[in-house]
Image (tube, helix red, strand yellow):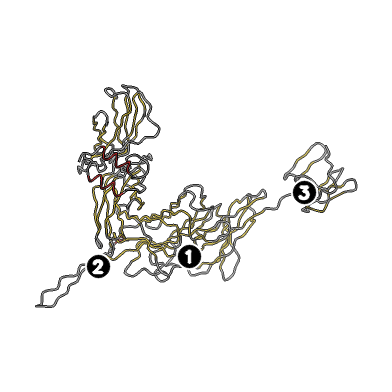
Amino acid sequence: MVFLIPDFVSAEISIGASLSSDNFRILDSQHSIFGGTASSSSSSFILRATVGDLAIGSSSITNFGLRSGFLYFPKVTAPILHTALKGNAEAFLSWTPASASQGFSVGGYNVCTKLTSGGTYSCQNVGNVIFYQKSSLTNNSDYTFKIETKDGVGNVVATSNEKSVTPVSSSIAEAANASTFNVATRNALTLTNSGGTTAVLDFPQNFYTQTVQLVANSFPNSYFASSKPAPSQKNFVGKTYDFNIFHPSTGDQISAISIPATITLSYSSSDVSGITESSLAPYRWGSSDSSWQLVSGATINTTNKTITFSTANFSSFAIFGTTAATPTPTPASSGGGGGGGGGSILATAAVEFGGFAYPSAVINFLKDGSNAGATTADSSGKFSFILSGLSAGGYNFGFWAQDKTGRRSVTFTKREILTSGSIAKVSNIVLPPTISLNKTSVNLGEQLTVSGSSVPDSQVRVSVVSEPKDYITKSLLNGDYSQVFSTIGLEKGIHTVKTKTEVLKTGDESIFSQLVTFGIGVAVPQKECSRDADINSDGKINLIDFSIMAYWWKRTVPEGSNVDLNCDGLLNLADFSILAFHWSG
């Protein structure tokens, strides 16, 4: 079939090789987009334009073969070599990913190296990566690097800019890592240092408006000593870090993200030798800063030796601590005079928490209703952390845990009065167990199984509130517990059950878990809210419960908090009405 196109239709052309057969030829193949002015012709016909392009590749019929269409030239965006750090006989290189189109793809990269003083590049295939640790270099020799991009069959199609590095045997980068993050999902990167300490960067979903590249580097604690000296009366603790974010297309550095990321830095026991561990705090030195800036709201886990904080700004980071005070000996009496020595005094208050949860549970901490950090319980369920840099005064602290299956406990709250220069200790915290049912609706006489996570090898009390009847079970070493009970003897309708933990080794008990609901012969309402007005679980509903609720008056309470008696997310008159109804005095 032949389509005739009026003469006013024209094409914008791209000249290429001739196409021909025994019966015709096209002198110049062309892309045909409306708006051009040229045409191609032979002695017997004229080609004004085509709609679409000749396909790439070969095709044939009985009378002729077309070996290729108009082959596209690849469109490639070259990588940008933005980071080159010196190491001990090595260099740490990272670059933005190249991109390709028009039928081509990026097949990998070559890292090319030469002596800056002269010589030619020697290129090494490193695969499809955006970070490489180039080794076997000579210290104190100046090297120049560039990155070559290869297509799918190994042809070099683009080359980056150059950067130079002089490897040295001291004050060097110790570890590095890089990754490109798709902001549509949660992302994390772990940097492992010599000696086994780590830096873990956890980015929430939609933390920025577009895909970014994170480059993380660590250094000895002496690396910044001259260029970025420690604050007065502070000491570097552990490794120091550069965390930088780049635009993957332009290589431009991004100094801040939209939603803060969580950074956890670990340190070793030797790192805090001679340091007051409770004084540890993270600091950041931004591109426009002239000194280290305290990152507030950090939590210290002295069991796991970690410090965790949140930040939306990226640059250089370090942990600092204060030298442990050495008591000054009391001078011998000499008949008069006065004065005495003493150790250093903490200018701010701190509080150290410790207690029990479930193995590998994530413990979340609240300070006056706001998130103050998180830590992870060890294999025995124990946890500890220090919250420092606080002003003197009263605080309401909250704790809740999430077990390995994702179930959450209720929030346990405790008020503490902190004094300037002191470290308050809150120990033997027992977080309430998590709880779930295998069914929410049963027939009369059927069995139900209640299960959850608790302190390992502890006693768990399962209370069917409407019976009332208690069952005693014991948690396993992994923290799991379960109890089967019969519904014989219960009435048709809605019932509730709750659990609490007793640590057998110490005798300490938790508050009760949240109430979970099941129906006998009836369906459970879709929205479930049934909480005990005994907020501090002392068996009474009195002024203590009232005072806890009063603090949260007209405030947004944490999700799952047991002070929100009607589960509407607020503390208001409706909750106090429920409290008053159950008042025991």
Residue 469, how many percent across, how many down?
23, 29
In the figure, residue 273 lies in which quadrant?
A: bottom left
Q: Which residue lies under the disc numbered 2?
A: 344
Q: Amino acid at mark 2?
A: Ser
Q: Earlier in the sequence, mark 3 or mark 1?
A: 3
Q: Residue furthest right?
A: 43
Asked whether the residues under the numbered discs 2 and 1 touch, taking CB atoms below 8 Å apart as contact, a structural biologist would say: no
The residue wearing badge 3 is 32
Cβ atoms under marks 2 and 3 closer than 8 Å: no
Q: Amino acid at mark 3?
A: Ser
Identify the residue position indicated by label 1 in the image.
86
The first of marks 2 and 1 along the sequence is 1
* In the image: residue 249, left or right of residue 464: right
Point out the frontmost of discs 2 and 1. Answer: 2
**Residue 380 in the image: x percent, y percent?**
29, 44
Apparent side of residue 165 relative to residue 329 in the rendered image (left or right): right
> Could you say whether the residue bearing mark 3 is in a helix, strand or loop?
loop
Relative to residue 426, is residue 489 depicted above or below? above
Give the distance between the C-alpha atoms of the residues marked 2 and 1, in whole angstroms. 39 Å
Frontmost residue, 502 versus 17: 502
Give the x, y percent position of residue 276.
28, 62
Determine the residue located farthest toward the left in the rendered image.
335
Looking at the rendered structure, the secondary structure element under dot 1 is strand
Secondary structure at badge 2 equals: loop
On the image, the x and y values in percent for residue 309 come to: 38, 56
Q: Nearer the viewer, mark 3 or mark 1?
A: 3
Q: CA distance from mark 3 to mark 1?
A: 52 Å
Q: Quadrant of residue 55?
A: top right
- The quarter of the picture where the N terminus appears is top right
Q: Is residue 280 above or below residue 547?
A: below
* Mark sitting earlier along the chain (2/3): 3
Amino acid at pointer 1? Lys
